[in-house]
Each structure stands twice: as structure tokens, then as C-alpha cells.
Image: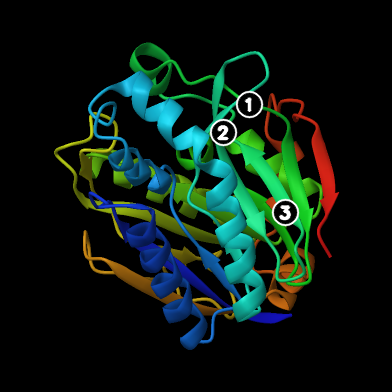
Amino acid sequence: MTLRVAAAQYPIEQLRDWNHYAAKLARWVAEAAAGGADLAVFPEYGAMELAALDPASMGDLAGSLATVSGLLGRVDALHAELAARHGLHILAASAPFRRTDGAFVNRARLFTPQGKVGVQDKLVMTRFEREQWHVSAGAPLRLFKTALGKIGITICYDSEFPLLARALCEAGMELLLVPSCTDTLHGYWRVRLGAQARALEGQCFAVHSPTVGQADWSPAVDVNRGAAAVYGPPDRGVPADGVLAVGELDQPGWVFADLDLALVADLRADGGVLNLRHWAEQPGAAPLPPVEIVDLR
């Protein structure tokens, strides 16, 4: 199946009020739809700009988690409405979600035009998340069957661990979404190289969406560096470097690419190399984590 993906280079802003946020999100989704996107991908922790709606706590790490998590119901209702209005799938910017045990996880949500929602939590926490912010690892790893194809999500740091994407590929994943939030070019390149490596190993496509811009008022997302991009396996039908599209570093906007998901099956069956099939031939190839299949069709 051929589809057009839109990857956001999404700027963190100090929002004035809820209407400011709602108008911003509606404008971004409308621009993706106007560009012909079937799937719009927003970054990790893009929702943290909502902490600005509570001036009393926006400068506090724990307070910002609580504020944004408390707004998540309204945020998700808005995404569901926009997905239905424009007839496209949306990976919402990830946000802190408070579990019933009181712990916060970093949660991405995939919305379909038909009103279904898939949830993927981040599985491996960065040092900042675990040592300073006290965000917990979530579970399980999920593969989403959608009208567009079979989609997996590895949030930022998760993309740097190959067994997660490998498990998704063995479950049938064709398209990997990599929302990210990185405050240095070192971090950006770690995630970018991870996404490109996962596309190579799994003979699939990967869509990388970062936050961009300065937000000095936020202790969580104060500096944001990166460029959105879409990657594929360097093989027949894909550019030699595997880069189908890449944005201008640190500049807000959408990056678009057209993907033929039939090429995934073709390359896995008869590519110049057969990385997916030959994985198990590595000495010490490890057991893979379980994958939960979620039908969003």
C-alpha cells in the first residue's frame, strides 16, 4: 500500500491558554492534511508545552508532569476530533500519563479517523527520566494493525535498542514511528542513527519526528534539537543512503514522504540483502520481547 507520511519538526512554545494550544494543533494537523498526509507523526514530549497553562507549576519538574497528565483527556479528545475531521491517522505527541499506582509513564497515542486509539508507552528510560524526572518504564510493546499497514512505535531512546524493533518486525511491522525529544545534537544523532539502523535491520520504513526550539521556561524541554526524516533500507526502490526525506535542522515544519509498503515485503523476500531473515545467524542472537497485537482497523 502506498501512503504519504508527514513528520513534524514541532516547536515547543509557551502557550497562553487552552485555546492557543487547540488552535496551534488544529493548524498543524490541517497543514499535514493539506499536504496529502495519510499519517501525521508528532514528537516525544511535545505535549509538555501544555505545562505553561499552569504558571504556578510550569517551572517545576514534578508539577509539569502533573499538569500535563491532568489535561490528557482533553488533549486526546481534540486529537480524535481532528483525525476524524481530516480523515488521517495521527500519532499524538507523547505525554506523561499517571497510572493507577501513581507512577508516570511516557505515553504515545495513535488515533485513527474511525475513532480507535492505540497506546504505546516508552519502555527504556533515559538518565534524565529515571534520575531527575522519575518517569517510569511502561509496557507492553505493541504492534498496531491499521488501515495504512502494520505500525510500531519506539519512543526516542527505545529506538536505540534493536531487539524492540526486531520483535515488532517479526510480528509483521512495516512502518516504525520514532517520536523524539533531544536537547543536543549528540542526542539527535543517536536517535537518528538508531532509526536508520532499525530500518536497515528490519527492512522497513522509519519515520522520525523531533521537538525543536527553545523553551527557557520549562525545566523539562528547555532546549530541543533535531530534524524530521523518513528512512528506508538502502536497497532497490530506496535512495542509496536510505534517506527518503529529511528536514532542515531545528526549523519548525512538516517533512513529507511517499511510501510503498509493498516494497517492504518485496525486499524481505528478495532484496539485495536479507537482514530480517538472516538475523538469527548472528552468534548469540537474543530472545525477543513479547509483542501485543492491537487491531485498529
Q: Could you classify mark 3 by the number of other residues whose Cα lies within 10 Å: few (under 14), some (14-19), or many (20 or more)?
A: some
Q: Amino acid at mark 1?
A: Gly
The answer to whether 228 is drawn above or below residue 16 in the figure is below
Does residue 242 appear left or right of residue 202 in this picture? left
* Residue 176 location (% of width, % of height): 61, 55
Number of numbered callouts drawn:
3
Disc 1 packing (10 Å; few <14; some 14–19; many ≥20): some
Seen in the image, is 252 located left or right of residue 288? left
Determine which residue is flagged by label 1.
Answer: 138
208 is higher (above) or lower (below) than 53: below
In contact (CB < 8 Å): disc 3 and disc 2: no
Q: Which residue is mark 3?
A: 117
Q: Are marks 1 and 3 in contact (CB under 8 Å)?
A: no
Q: Position of residue 90 (x, y in %)?
A: 59, 64
**Which image quadrant for residue 190?**
top left
The residue to which callout 2 is attached is: 122
Considering only order in the chain, which callout, 3 or 1, is on the residue closer to the N terminus? 3
Dot 1: what SS? loop
Does residue 112 appear in the picture of this structure? yes
Identity, as a three-letter code, of the amino acid under mark 3:
Val
Q: What percent of the width, then of the height, locates residue 161? A: 54, 33
- Tell me what residue is drawn at x 22 percent, y 65 percent: 251
